[in-house]
Image (tube, rainbow, N blue to C red):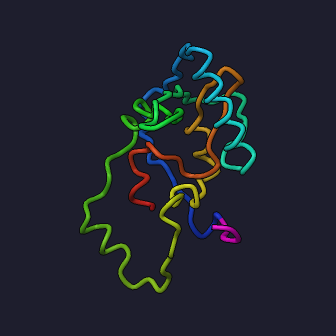
């Protein structure tokens, strides 16, 4: 959402601090998958969705999944991070929390998740590893347990 300050809306993770952070070791792939991974990282970096990170506490692997027609889709394995996140609130609590608010948001459903910023303190939790280095999302990625509640 261009022009919208992250102070108005940003996605926060409810990570249980009692859970020890997990740093997954980098998986090895064949050259075709590495090339697709590099292309996707370059694309995400050029549009400002990801940034490099130096010393993340949480680190996830990239999983390359073949698309039904042609090419590869890059997914991030947030299994460990999702286990450490608190569950979603009940739907009646969500409805009650939105009652009385005057702001209504219309978002593009095609890349709706990527229109919401990650809270700066939680960006490093979304770190992932590639053969080129470590990156984290500046916007809300797919695959996070509580992302649907913010969206």
Report which quarter residue 130 is drawn in.
top right
Classify the position of the C terminus by image quarter: bottom left
Q: Residue at x 69, y 42 (%)?
A: 43
The secondary structure that dominates the magenta segment is loop
Residue 10 image position (x, y, % from top left): 56, 60
Q: Residue at x 52, y 67 (%)?
A: 108
Q: Position of residue 149 (x, y in %)?
A: 39, 59
Q: Which of the 4 quarters of the picture holds residue 89?
A: bottom left
Residue 136 in percent (x, y) is at: 63, 38
Q: Residue furthest right?
A: 46
Assess whether residue 34 is covered by the magenta stretch.
no
From what the image shows, is residue 45 above or below residue 113?
Answer: above
Q: Is residue 109 above or below residue 69?
A: below
In the displayed structure, does residue 51 sit left or right of residue 123?
right
Q: Quadrant of the N terminus?
A: bottom right
Q: Is residue 2 magenta?
A: yes
* Residue at horizontal 66 percent and vertical 34 percent from the top: 135
Q: Above or below — where is 104 with respect to 26?
A: below
79 or 41, which lies in front?
A: 41
Q: Considering depth in this image, is 86 or 40 the residue closer to the camera? A: 40
| Residue 5 vs residue 111, the one in the foreground | 111
- The reply, left or right, for residue 21 in relation to residue 139 is left
What residue do we see at 72% from left, 29% from top? 54
Task: Depth check: give the residue in front, 146 or 30.
Answer: 30
Q: Which residues are magenta?
A: 1-5
Residue 78: x and y in percent read 45, 34
């Amino acid at each position: 959402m261009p022009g919208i300050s992250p102070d108005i809306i940003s996605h926060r993770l409810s990570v249980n601090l009692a859970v020890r952070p997990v740093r997954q070791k980098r998986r090895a792939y064949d050259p075709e998958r590495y090339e697709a991974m590099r292309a996707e990282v370059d694309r995400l970096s050029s549009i400002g969705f990801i940034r490099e990170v130096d010393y993340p506490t949480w680190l996830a692997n990239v999983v390359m999944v073949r698309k039904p027609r042609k090419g590869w889709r890059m997914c991030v394995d947030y299994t460990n991070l999702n286990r450490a996140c608190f569950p979603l609130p009940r739907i009646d609590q969500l409805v009650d929390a939105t009652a009385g608010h005057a702001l209504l948001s219309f978002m593009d459903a095609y890349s709706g998740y990527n229109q919401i910023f990650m809270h700066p303190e939680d960006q490093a939790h979304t770190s992932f590893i590639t053969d080129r280095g470590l990156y984290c999302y500046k916007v809300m990625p797919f695959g996070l347990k509580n992302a649907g509640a913010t969206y």
